Image: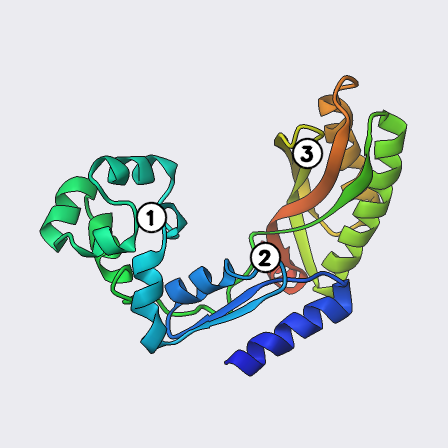
């Protein structure tokens, strides 16, 4: 598994020149925990001999599935790390957190029986670009929009996938992010169509007083060309 993870990391870097961190373990929860270590270009292996020690020392807000609100509630109960979480019984956790308490009881003991779904299909496909300098003029953003939609359309065609919902993403200089969507009248993978609708969304949501740091375009509500043809034939 460690060899496969390293191979995936190498392949990602070879194709995109981007680094990533990876986690390898005997279940999904611990693998995800491991992937947060040694960022941005690390590989962490958590075997059964190390799992409990790592979970005991892990701050409660670092447990995946525990958000800010739940973490605050846990701290009020004296739970600051996995070690304190481990000390509560199933009944206590369920009493305080409902059904998800059983999940907390198991994962802090290194138990996660969820299977890896290898044939998962994406709900959307997107391309985005972070600018070296923030862009404050609409013409500059539109030029980038053309490049990004060209890349997106190329990905869609390569994977024989079409979509019927256009999404744009804007990250401003202050790191605030907004997303906007528009439903299309039909499925498409055509660059001109994607660009036309994405441009409408960009113009409608552009704010001249707020420089943009990142621009992204995506297609949602995906379908394969083969499946869409079958649907048309059925009608």
Badge 1 or badge 3: first in the primary sequence: 1
- Eye-nearest disc, 2 or 1: 1
Residue 183, placed above or below residue 86: above
Q: Tell which tag, 2 or 3, sits nearer the viewer.
A: 3
> Of the numbered discs in the image, which one, if any, rests on residue 216?
none
Tell me how far mark 2 sits from mark 1, CA to CA. 48 Å
Q: Give how far across and how far down residue 57 sits, in percent.
A: 34, 57
Quarter assignment of residue 13 = bottom right
Residue 232 in view: no
Element type at marker 3?
strand
Residue at the disc numbered 1 = 60
Residue toward you, 168 or 23: 23
Q: Residue at x 12, y 54 (%)?
A: 89
Q: Which quadrant would residue 165 be assigned to in this image? A: top right
SS for dot 1: helix
Q: Which mark is residue 231?
A: 2
Which residue in the protein does label 3 denote? 171
Task: Give left or right: position of 185 versus 149.
Answer: left
Spatial CA distance of label 1 from label 3 is 29 Å
């Amino acid at each position: 598994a460690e060899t496969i993870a390293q191979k995936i990391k190498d392949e990602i870097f070879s194709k995109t020149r981007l680094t990533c961190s990876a986690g390898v373990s005997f279940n999904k929860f611990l693998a995800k925990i491991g992937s947060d270590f040694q960022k941005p270009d690390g590989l962490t292996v958590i075997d059964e001999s190390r799992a409990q020690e790592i979970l005991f020392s892990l701050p409660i807000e670092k447990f995946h599935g525990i958000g800010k609100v739940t973490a605050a509630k846990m701290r009020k109960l004296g739970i600051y790390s996995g070690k304190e979480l481990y000390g509560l019984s199933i009944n206590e956790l369920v009493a305080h957190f409902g059904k998800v308490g059983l999940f907390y009881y198991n994962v802090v003991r290194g138990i996660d029986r969820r299977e890896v779904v290898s044939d998962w299909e994406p709900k959307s496909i997107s391309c985005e670009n972070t600018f070296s300098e923030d862009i404050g003029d609409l013409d500059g953003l539109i030029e980038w929009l053309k490049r990004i939609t060209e890349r997106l359309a190329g990905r869609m065609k390569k994977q024989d996938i079409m979509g019927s919902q256009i999404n744009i993403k804007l990250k401003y200089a202050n790191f605030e992010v907004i997303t906007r969507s528009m439903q299309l009248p039909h499925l498409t993978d055509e660059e001109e169509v994607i660009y036309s609708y994405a441009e409408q969304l960009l113009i409608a949501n552009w704010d001249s007083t707020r420089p943009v740091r990142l621009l992204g375009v995506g297609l949602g509500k995906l379908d394969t060309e083969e499946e869409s043809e079958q649907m048309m034939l059925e009608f």
